[in-house]
Image (cartoon, grey):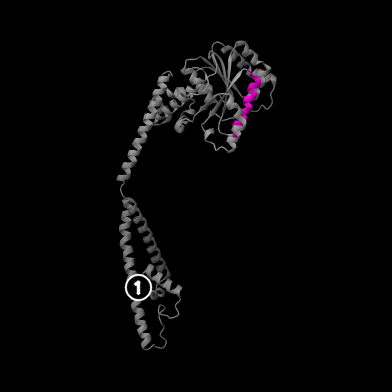
Amino acid sequence: MASLTRELLKAAADEGDRYRAAKAKNLAQLLARSDLRLPPDWERVYSLGIAMPIFIMELIWAVRAEARQTALKELSEETDSDDQVVGDRPTRSSAPQEKPREWLLRHVVEAVCAVPWESIPCLSGAVVVFRAASAGTLFIITATVAADIVGWMS
Amino acid sequence: MSLKSLPVDLNNTVVFTTGNKGGVGKTTVTQGVLDTLLLNSIPYFVAQVDRQDRLAQMNQVEVLTILSDPEVTTIDPESEFRRFGPLMDLIIGAAGQGTAVIDLGANELDRFCAWAKLSDLDGAIGDTNQNVVALVVFNAEEQSIVESRKSIEAILDALSLAQVVLVENQRFGRISDLAPGSDIAVAYERELGPFVKRYPKVTVPAVRGNSYQRFEHRRLSFGAVAVMSPAQIMGITGLGMADARIARGDIAKWLEVVSDQFEHLLGLK
């Protein structure tokens, strides 16, 4: 081992400073480069590719259900105004006593689950819950990936 | 450098390091003094009174180690004579030969001072015309500040010839960074304010990047690390080549700063 001298001490200190500065510079360059070349998270892109069509399909179904619902309502109103058959039960949506909360619930269920309100009693509860959950999950995935894409672009 | 030099002849000097509180960095400061003496080719003689013998493990020279007994709670003159007897031989033996450096561990100052008075160490040092320097180490902790004030009073009571030097160890923070009204800042003003005006003060910075921690458990002195090759450092620490050079540089830089202050203090510059 070399003996301790002032020159050796200074040389070691200066060398340490040089290496520290070089390391900081390299790290900064590496970070800058990696930030530019960071590849997209392909798993998320694939999941977006799957989620998006399903989500769009769900939306289409919801719009179609809404249209069908409107048509049924119009038909029902026409029937009511002509001659109401005794014993015929009016549809829930066209019931005159529908409260704002029920109206909101009906629209939410129809939009999220993409099924007409009238058909819900025919479906099992599990199916309704499953469709609602899958629609919610797809929405979250889409929102997350969209946020990622915005992040990559900025 | 505004640090005032002490009128000392390092071929005829005794340096005590004290602080009377554990963990303030007495041994670190002592090692800084030893490396400074080594750097300037001043012969030195070392003693450590403590529960541990770090200085003996860190230095290539013979170190007189007086191990503390944590069970002892009272000062018994007979046993103190037995324990500290070799210290007198080391101090007197160093007269005209070099610098005697004595590290007084935590809670050892009272026993040492009792022995110094009983054995008239002051008179013996006066006979050999040795200079006495007392490095009182403290950090930014209230207890350490209070203890260092007590240490100054105790050492001046036992060794009237002692020239006190305050040593602030900044490893865990700097006194100057404290908020003016904080408990520690107030304690510093109250306990050490009068001494700061009267005695020189050395500041020991923290080692950059906490680099010495990698060598501490290996019982390597700062000087020993500074002269090691990067390959040796890589072998000891497991660091890569660049980091080994950085760690060595941090320690070398620390020793440069500390030895520069001690060289001014001890009249080597």
Using the rendered view, name the quadrant where residue B224 is placed: top left
B129, B242: nearer the viewer: B129
**The residue under label 1 is which amino acid type?**
Glu
The residue range painted magenta reads: B142-160
Q: Report the predominant secondary structure element of the magenta stretch.
A: helix
A127, B108: nearer the viewer: B108
Who's the residue at 56% across and 33% down the image?
B140
Who's the residue at 33% across and 63% down the image?
A55
Residue B158: in magenta span: yes
A119, B261: nearer the viewer: B261
Using the rendered view, name the quadrant where residue B78 is placed: top right
**Tag 1 residue:** A66
Instruction: Report the quarter where the N terminus of chain A lies.
Output: top left
Q: Position of residue B260 (x, y in %)?
A: 47, 22
Where disc 1 sits, the SS reads helix
Who's the residue at 33% across and 54% down the image?
A150
